[in-house]
Image (tube, helix red, strand yellow):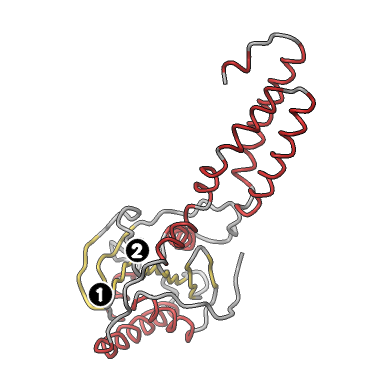
Amino acid sequence: MASLFDSVTLPGLVDKLVVVGLVYGCTLILRKEAALRILAVLTAMAVAGFVSAQLGLTATASFFHIILSSAPVILAIIFQSDLKRALFSIWKPHAVANGDSVELTSTVDELSKGLTELAERRIGALIVIIRQMSIDHLVQIGTEIDAKVTSELLNSIFLPYSPIHDGAVIIQRDKITSAGCFLPLSQNPDIAKSFGTRHRAALGISEQTDVLVLVVSEETGKISIVHEGKITYDADPAEIRRLSRKAIEGRRAPRASAPQEH
């Protein structure tokens, strides 16, 4: 880029100021605009680069050329979560064996019962069900627990006076593996300001992995389903059971229609 700034003429200076403005503008766009709009931005840059070249604005045209030549890397960074999910979906292990059906049903029953009890008492809760992808590199593990999922254990963990009630519970297959875990918060600027830390943490981990997250709001007593970076607020109990079972099995399931809060 240093060779672009040899000229000290007035047109050259104006050209360089345009580049500075474009760099700043692109930074704002990448921070505020939705990822799906980036393709339109890159198209506009291609047109602007062509026009700049025709007008003799060499620095500006070179800037657009450099950005466009780096487009694959830029898109890979922006859509990294989607690419990760797409690549991971190419290979999936088989679901839970039929012999585990009874144990699986018991786990789902206990989980549903625990969620209902917590919601009725308006006790906040954050539960992460691991499907297949590891989340160890994203989670700060609190207390390791190797115990079956029971409503009594879930209630005792999330009681306000429990030392680990603020963190998340991690469930893998039919076991609670850890509790009091801290999850990465979502950086999505479009998230509703009404969402608290639990909902932002649920969205944050679901944006980067294939987990299913269940959130109980202590303010409203409503249960939310969070997966694939999307949230269903005040979810239907049958839908909670259906998706919980699929997640514990290590499978995905299309979401039925449900109210969403943005």
x 74%, y 23%: residue: 57
Q: Tell me if residue 192 comes above or below residue 60 in the rendering.
A: below
Kind of residue sitting beneath label 1: Lys
x 31%, y 66%: residue: 161
Q: Tell me if residue 139 comes above or below residue 215 in the rendering.
A: above
Q: In the depicted view, which residue is nearer to us: 54 or 1? A: 54
Left or right of residue 123, residue 45 in this image: right
> Residue 130: which disc?
none
> Residue 133: which disc?
2
Instruction: Tell me which corner region of the image, top left, top right, bottom left or bottom right, holds residue 118.
Output: bottom left
Instruction: Tell me which corner region of the image, top left, top right, bottom left or bottom right, holds residue 28.
Output: top right
Q: Tell me if residue 167 comes above or below residue 235 in the rendering.
A: above
Kind of residue sitting beneath label 2: Met
Q: Where, quadrant-wise, is the N terminus in this rendering? A: top right
Describe the element under mark 2 as helix, strand or loop. Answer: loop
Q: Residue 135 at what x, y percent from top left?
A: 33, 59
x 35%, y 54%: residue: 138
Instruction: Tell me which corner region of the image, top left, top right, bottom left or bottom right, holds residue 108.
Output: bottom left
x 72%, y 15%: residue: 12
How far apart marks 2 and 1 lie (CA) works out to 16 Å
Q: In the depicted view, which residue is nearer to us: 86 or 141? A: 86
Q: Residue 245 at what x, y percent from top left?
A: 38, 81
Category of crowding for the residue at label 1, using alpha-carbon neighbours closer than 10 angstroms: few (below 14), some (14–19), many (at least 20): some
Q: Residue 44 at what x, y percent from top left?
A: 72, 42
Total residue callouts: 2
Sequence order check, earlier mark of 2 and 1 = 2
Q: In the depicted view, which residue is nearer to us: 99 or 205? A: 99
Q: Where, quadrant-wise, is the C terminus in this rendering? A: bottom right
- Residue lying at the far left of the rendered structure: 146
Which residue is identified by label 1? 175
Describe the element under mark 1 as helix, strand or loop. Answer: strand
